[in-house]
Amino acid sequence: MRRNRKFYTAVLLLTMVMVLGFATFCMASEGGNVPPISQPAGHTPAFGNWFVIGWTAVNFFVLLALLYKFAYNPINAMLEQRSSTIESSLKHAEEVKIEVEEMRKETQSNLAESRKEAQEIVARATKAADDAKNEIISKAKEDAVNIKNKATAEIQAATEQAKVELKDTAAALALLAAEKVLNRAITDDDHKKMVKQFVNEAGDLLC
Amino acid sequence: MIFGMFDGPLFYLGPIPVDHLVVTEWVLIALIGTIGYFATRDMQMVPRGLQNAFEMIILWTYDFFTQLMDKEHVAKKWAPLLTAFFLFILCSNYSGLVPGAANIPGYQPPTSNWNVTMTLALITFFSVHIAGLSEHGGHYFKHFVSPSPAMLPLNLIEEVAHPLSLTVRLFGNIFGEEMVIAFLLFLAPFIIPSAIMGLSLLLGAIQAIVFTILSASYIAAATGEGH
């Protein structure tokens, strides 16, 4: 930009120097008369009007300056701004992409963790259920054994009692029968002794 | 006063005479400047309307001349000047086609006067040599004696012929076109000149492009590796 200004100023200066030089030369050679600027109809315009040439050079560089001010500089600035905006947008998009990728990975790892946890929970529940089942079964078995034992003991006691009762009943019956057979020929003491012996032997055989 | 010609300065600014052409140039420059001012007054990130159109014109010309030159930094340096040439010549060529312009006494498009075209050609001439000197330094003068010192006169003639051809080409085309339109308007005021005026639109754009392309190619040649 600054370099451009230098070059353009050089061009303008050289043009003006040339214009002024020729103008001075022409005016001196024509005795100070300004040549007619335009020609009457049908003639080509006069050449070498140094005032028009000088004005045009100045005007052109004024136009160049105006274009710099109102066109090149703002448009260049805007282009730079645009390119920087696009660059930052692209960068931002890249960042967002990376972020999304990270989030996706995190979600996947979370999902895998959740799955693992769920499996663990299921496994734990299954184990607890198994434990409970086993406990219930063992308790049931224990109960069954207890009940059986108790029943056996009761049966045993009942059997013993029945034996005792049977012995007594048998003794009484034998006594009665012996009394009837012997018709009180033996004394009560003999009788009882005999019967008891008998019953004891019979009872041993019975049981 | 036929053909809108008018002799003598329009007014004097101190001792300096101001011709119609100069006033026309002022108007054109003011017009371009005003459009530029309103287009870039409130620059938006997303261009719209006038800003969009103006940006497009400037960037198109800028890109166009940048592509013409091989060296990027040279193009960056001189493309603004060439864009200014293009806009100035285009507006100036079209100024002859503004309806009612022919009724203004003394009015003529600036580029139909060869004082103006010569000024533009002189600016090109100095730009070419300054570009060459800044790019190659003292080596630039070698190209005047290449391939052998015997070619010096021819090379010098070539250097003078460039601005001369630029001057005469632009002046001749626009002046001729203006004359044809003026004659046709004189002979048949309706309809017939409009065909030529349509052609003039094309011609004005072509001449503006030709002048700037040639200027660009001269600058590119002066800064190129050939020297």
Image (cartoon, grey):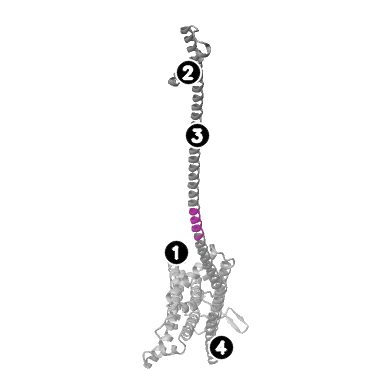
Q: Which residue is mark 4?
A: A33
Q: Are marks 3 and 2 on the same chain?
A: yes
| Main secondary structure found in the magenta portion | helix
Q: Position of residue B153 (x, y in %)?
A: 40, 91
Q: Secondary structure at mark 3?
A: helix
Element carrying mark 2: helix
Q: Is residue B187 magenta?
A: no
Q: Is residue A145 above or below residue B89?
A: above
Q: Which residues are magenta?
A: A98-109
> Which numbered tag is attached to residue B94?
none
User: How far is disc 2 from disc 4 in space, using C-alphas?
Assistant: 189 Å
**In the displayed structure, would residue B119 be above or below residue A90?**
below
- Disc number at residue A142? 3
Between the C-alphas of marks 3 and 2, the distance is 45 Å
Name the residue that disc number 1 marks: B191
Q: Are marks 3 and 4 on the same chain?
A: yes
How crowded pointer 3 is (Cα within 10 Å; few <14, some 14-19, many 20+) is rated as: few
Distance between the Cα atoms at labels 2 and 1? Answer: 169 Å
Q: Local crowd at mark 1 within 10 Å, few (<14), some, or many (≥20)?
A: few
> Residue B130, position in %: x, y?
49, 85
